[in-house]
Image: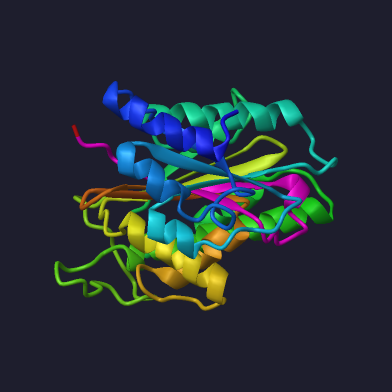
Amino acid sequence: MLRVEELFEAMPNLARKGINPPLFIISTRLYPEKAPKLIEKIRKWLPNSDFLLIASDSNAFPPLQPLVRDNVRHLIINPESTHLLNIDRESAQFRTVVTKLIEGRPLKICDYLKPGTETYEFRVSSSDQKEELIAGLEDLISGSGPEIELLRQKGALLVDEMFENALYGAPHEKNGASIYAKGQLRQVDSKENIVLRYGFDGECIAMEMEDSWGSLSPDAVLECLATNHDSHEICEEAGGRGLFIIWRFLDHLHVHIDPGRQTVVGGQVKLVTAENLIEKKGFHITTCRTN
């Protein structure tokens, strides 16, 4: 592992040789507080590299405004707790994340679930479907006991917020004005695509909502998360309230944006964390790569 000084010395040589690592993995023990200029200096020489921050759940959660400044869109919380059901599973998920970031592919709900877990997809055609979709997820989470019941409650809340965001928060005029008022009866146009997906593997629920507006921007998403975390204020821009609630109740958030065409918001909640509203949580904010 290179020290910071060695890394800085190596970067000009990498740039001169045309070597541009697609991804740097950096510990939050180093950035953003101990080496606040680290990302800026790397980007000076290697502007096309992406960055993944790793934070331990036993350490303080990093401030997020520096990530906004440096456009760092990926944060993973490394679990060190002894109550984890399957350490190998966590390692496999980490490898999947790294591979997808290097290849420029977005996360999908199957990446959170055990291999072979069935996932379900529902095309939304009306605002009247919300209760039916929530009930379907609740029925899917089989079992009994307080942890299972809390998982159902979290799942129901998340589907509610994702549904509201997709139907009322995402549609905007070109000038940024909302097209639909929240709560109004709404039929989804045949040209519009709103899809809910979810799955449950006995230990984890994963879900995502896709809309065909692509009205979010990665900068706005990151700013929203940072504002809510660092100042404890709910920003209303870019669907800020709903996005904040989704991030707060998920264990991990992913947002994938194809500007003007598609937004996917999703993530996972584990059974082992169902009874807690964990404060330290990660996110991935990705966009379609342009050739």
Rendering coords of residue 155 (x, y %) = 61, 55
* Quarter of the image that includes the N terminus: top right
Q: Is residue 242 magenta?
A: no
Q: Is residue 70 left or right of residue 154?
A: left
Q: Please determine whether, in this image, residue 122 is positioned above or below residue 243.
A: above
The structure's colour scheme is rainbow
Identify the image quadrant of residue 279. Answer: bottom right
- Residue shown at 52%/57% (left/top)? 159
* Quarter of the image that includes the C terminus: top left
Q: Please determine whether, in this image, residue 259 is positioned above or below residue 225.
A: above
**Residue 61 seen in the figure:** yes
Identify the image quadrant of residue 152. Answer: bottom right
Q: Nearer the viewer, residue 201 or 277?
A: 277
**Residue 123 seen in the figure:** no
Q: Nearer the viewer, residue 145 or 98?
A: 98
- Residue shown at 23%/67% (left/top)? 172
Region in magenta: 267-290
Q: Is residue 284 magenta?
A: yes
Identify the image quadrant of residue 127. Answer: bottom left
Q: Please determine whether, in this image, residue 48 is positioned above or below residue 132.
A: above
- Residue shown at 75%/30% (left/top)? 87
Rendering coords of residue 58 (x, y %) = 76, 51
Q: Nearer the viewer, residue 101 or 151?
A: 101
